[in-house]
Image: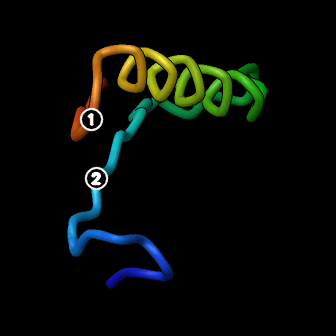
Amino acid sequence: MIAGLPAAVLTVSLGVASVIPVIETEPATLVNAAEETLYQAKRKGRDRVVA
């Protein structure tokens, strides 16, 4: 049992993003890109990685 879950199975969806750091790039750009890929992964189902 994992933290009160009935099954011993844990699924993970990840959103991954990267940028080449330059002074003009705002940190929020990277965060927003990772967040968008996370939502794409969640829409595709369990155990997904979107980059």
Q: Would you call the spot at circle 2 few (<14 residues within 10 Å), some (14-19), or many (20 or more)?
A: few
Q: Quadrant of residue 5?
A: bottom left
Which of these two is toward me, 16 or 23?
A: 16
Q: Residues within 10 Å of mark 1 (few under 14, many from 20)?
A: few
Amino acid of disc 2: Thr
How many marks on residues? 2
Residue 38 in picture, x, y percent from top left? 47, 28
21 displayed left or right of 2: right
Of residue 26 and residue 10, the one placed in the foreground of this image is: 10
Q: Residue at x 55, y 17 (%)?
A: 36
Q: Image point 24% across, 33% down: which residue?
A: 48
Per the rendering, the mark at residue 46 is: 1
Residue 14 placed where, x, y %? 37, 40
From the image, tell me which residue sits under label 2: 11
Q: Nearer the viewer, residue 16 or 45?
A: 45
Distance, label 2 to label 1, CA atoms, is 6 Å
Residue in view at x 40 percent, y 15 percent: 43
Tell me, yes or no, whether the two marked residues, 2 and 1, touch with CB atoms within 8 Å: yes
Q: Quadrant of the N terminus?
A: bottom left
Judging from the image, what secondary structure is the residue with disc 2 in? loop
- Kind of residue at badge 1: Arg
Tell me where residue 29 appears, x and y as whole percent.
Answer: 69, 22
Relative to 13, does residue 50 appear above or below in the rendering? above
Q: Is residue 36 left or right of residue 8?
A: right
Identify the image quadrant of residue 26. top right
